[in-house]
Image (cartoon, helix red, strand yellow):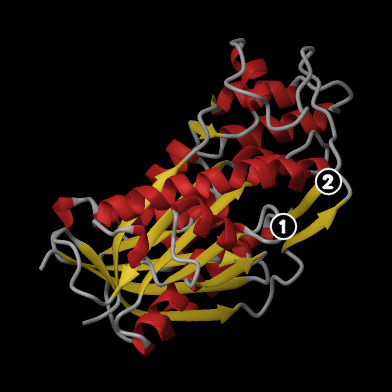
Amino acid sequence: MAASILSIGTAVPPARVAQRAARDVFASQPGLSRVAQRLLHAAFDASAIEHRNTVLSDLVAVASGEPAIGEPAMPLAGEDGRIQAPSTGVRNDAYIRLAPPLFAEASAEALAGAGIRPDQITHVVTVSCTGMFAPGPDFRLVKDLGLSPAVERYHIGFMGCAAALPGLRAAARICDSQPEAVVLVAAAELCTLHIRSSEDPQQIVAASVFADGAAAAVVSALPLGDGPRLELDRFGTVLTSEGESEMVWTVGDEGFDMVLTAEVPRIIGREIRAAVDGFLEGAEPGVWAVHPGGRSVLDRVESGLALHPDALTASRDVLRRQGNMSSATILFILRDLLHDDSLGDAQVAALAFGPGLTVESALLRRTTA
């Protein structure tokens, strides 16, 4: 039996901000030039995002005019609405406190959805690029969920938005070599810890699209559960011929620095057909799960592959509801497709894009049998 996703759980921080309200906070920052204000309004308004969840409850409080939900992740937005510039250490300390509970919440939901007990998990693969510590998220999941101390653990770090697909690929490889394996793949990202007020166009774009969230999948080749599953057929990975300097993720003094230029969607549009043709090997999926790095990325994929607009409905819907949660986002989309009974048995192609520029692919089959 093929390795399959049996269940996907998700979790988001409780603070939720409307895109227009977030835009107005950033646009009102003192010292912004008129050019930067125009660019900021254009980026936020063209994002196709309506709401995002964030651990920055103080920022949401300023944006909404309501009291903050819980303790703020870090001192980012003062009562006067001025956005501060915490150090990378302060931001990472917030990640260490707040990411593990999201990993655990999404994972617990995934286990419950698959009807899996914690002691049945044999392997854990964690994914994240927005913070780092050791012992890390993989270690914490074992403790927080009460998994066996003998569980094999792997962590995929700093691979960016594409990393959940390599996480699923690793789970499929484990199941191929150990048919009795039950693998938990969990991705959590606190992207908004690294946003800042800036006139840099790339930081403005980052502030306009990134959000926080976590998702986890239970993967196994065993005949477990009786609900629909997503069979993991095959995977592909391609480095584009250009783009190494267009999507970059590094550690700066005031948070992690994202380089995300306007060339990224253009490169994807030019190279997506060649990257996907080799991976599909003649398959013609009618449903696509595409990481929404932004609306322009989805538009370029749609035009580059000549897809029917309905093919990206789930991807656009997650972008609208949640924004770009980096690696966790593709699992949110796959979760929606897994639970969409109108699809019946359907072939699903998944695409995600990471620094480099890297195209990660997966071909899945939704089955109810």
At label 1, counting other C-alpha atoms closer than 10 Å, the crowd grade (few under 14, some 14-19, many 20 or more) is: few
Residue 117 percent across, percent down from the top left: 30, 58
Q: Amino acid at mark 1?
A: Phe
Q: Is residue 228 left or right of residue 336?
A: left
Q: Amino acid at mark 2?
A: Gly
At label 2, counting other C-alpha atoms closer than 10 Å, the crowd grade (few under 14, some 14-19, many 20 or more) is: few
Question: Label 1, on which residue?
Answer: 133
User: First in sequence: mark 2 or mark 1?
Assistant: 2
Question: Label 2, on which residue?
Answer: 89
Figure check: 168 above or below 17: below
Point out the residue furthest to the bottom here.
177
Residue 182 percent across, percent down from the top left: 34, 71
Residue at horizontal 60 percent and vertical 46 percent from the top: 99
Residue 86 percent across, percent down from the top left: 84, 36
Q: Secondary structure at mark 2?
A: helix
Figure check: 48 above or below 24: below
Residue 288, image quadrant: bottom left
Q: Secondary structure at mark 1?
A: loop
Q: Check if mark 2's residue and mark 1's residue have beta carbons within 8 Å.
A: no
Q: Is residue 366 left or right of residue 12?
A: left
